[in-house]
Image: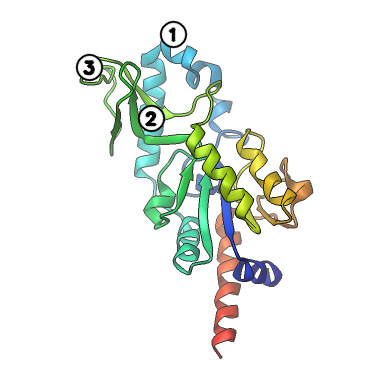
């Protein structure tokens, strides 16, 4: 942990890539673990454009349930640690695959949401976006002022990532001399390719995940802990380092 903390403190441009595991300790179910959401529901039934148009009420009931979970959750210690690193000027950007707003609520300002946000609803007719703080009551199905059907503002399976956000994330990866990859299996693309960009450009990868992942073989440091446990230990070491520098 001492070596990892030194790498973080001495980094010139530190970024982070987070996935569902990062928010799991806030009580938000993950998608690919043994007790994850996709173990109970088929993705093709709930998270594709085809599923939405086939049965919008089913999809909306499930997303309203997800929204209730997310909106009532609180940032965990790992979220707060990232916010503290940003305040210290060490962490430059958080790139997240998560559709929750826990990074924001913890205090991070520089965040790129690759897969959209649950707080946003989009009109399928006119494209207008609305920000919400509580899930819509289903039924009836939520509609726009133009009477178009609203959908969750997330990226579904089979849909491309927002080009602007993906390009920005790739630019951040190119600038990174160190990237923390936490709570993600790194299976879903193109998000999973971002650590590869960092590695290709000569940067270091710090992986935080209890399990082996698709990018474990390129990680320079592997922390087999939960995000909360790992970040608690890292922040303790960083505080010691900074205190030693002052003295």
Disc 1 to disc 3, C-alpha distance = 21 Å
Instruction: Quadrant for residue 180, please give it.
Output: bottom right
Q: Which mark is residue 146?
A: 3
Label 2, residues with CA under 10 Å away: few <14, some 14-19, many ≥20 = few
Horizontal placement of 132 versus 38: left or right? left
Identity of the residue drawn at 44% across and 53% down: 110
- Front position among marks 1 and 3: 3
Indicate the secondary structure of the residue bearing disc 3: loop
User: Which label's residue is closer to the chain start, 2 or 1?
Assistant: 1
- Residue 99, image x and y in percent? 45, 38
Residue picked out by circle 1: 54
Mark 3 is surrounded, within 10 Å at the Cα level, by few (under 14), some (14 to 19) or many (20 or more) other residues, namely few
| Extreme-right residue of the structure | 217
Occupied quadrant, residue 205 = bottom right
- Image location (x, y in percent) of residue 191: 60, 38
Quarter of the image that includes the C terminus = bottom right
Marker disc for residue 154: none
């Amino acid at each position: 942990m001492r070596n990892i903390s030194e790498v973080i403190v001495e980094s010139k441009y530190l970024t982070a890539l987070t996935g569902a595991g990062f928010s799991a300790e806030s009580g938000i179910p993950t998608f690919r673990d043994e007790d994850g959401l996709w173990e109970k529901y088929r993705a093709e039934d709930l998270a594709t454009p085809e599923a939405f148009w086939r049965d919008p009420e089913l999809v909306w009931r499930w997303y309203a349930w997800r929204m209730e979970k997310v909106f009532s959750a609180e940032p965990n210690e790992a979220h707060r640690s990232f916010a503290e690193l940003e305040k210290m000027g060490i962490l430059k950007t958080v790139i997240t695959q998560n559709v929750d707003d826990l990074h924001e609520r913890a205090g991070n300002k520089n965040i790129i949401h690759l897969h959209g946000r649950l707080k946003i609803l989009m009109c399928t007719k006119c494209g207008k976006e609305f920000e919400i703080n509580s899930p819509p009551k289903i039924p009836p199905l939520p509609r726009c002022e133009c009477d178009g059907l609203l959908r969750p503002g997330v990226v579904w399976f089979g849909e491309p990532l927002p080009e602007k956000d993906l390009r920005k994330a790739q630019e951040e990866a190119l600038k990174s001399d160190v990237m923390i990859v936490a709570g993600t299996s790194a299976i879903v693309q193109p998000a999973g390719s971002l650590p590869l960009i960092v590695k290709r450009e000569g940067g270091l990868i710090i992986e935080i995940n209890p399990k082996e992942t698709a990018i474990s073989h390129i990680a320079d440091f592997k922390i087999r802990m939960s995000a909360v446990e790992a970040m608690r230990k890292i922040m303790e070491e960083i505080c010691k380092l900074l205190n030693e520098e002052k003295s």
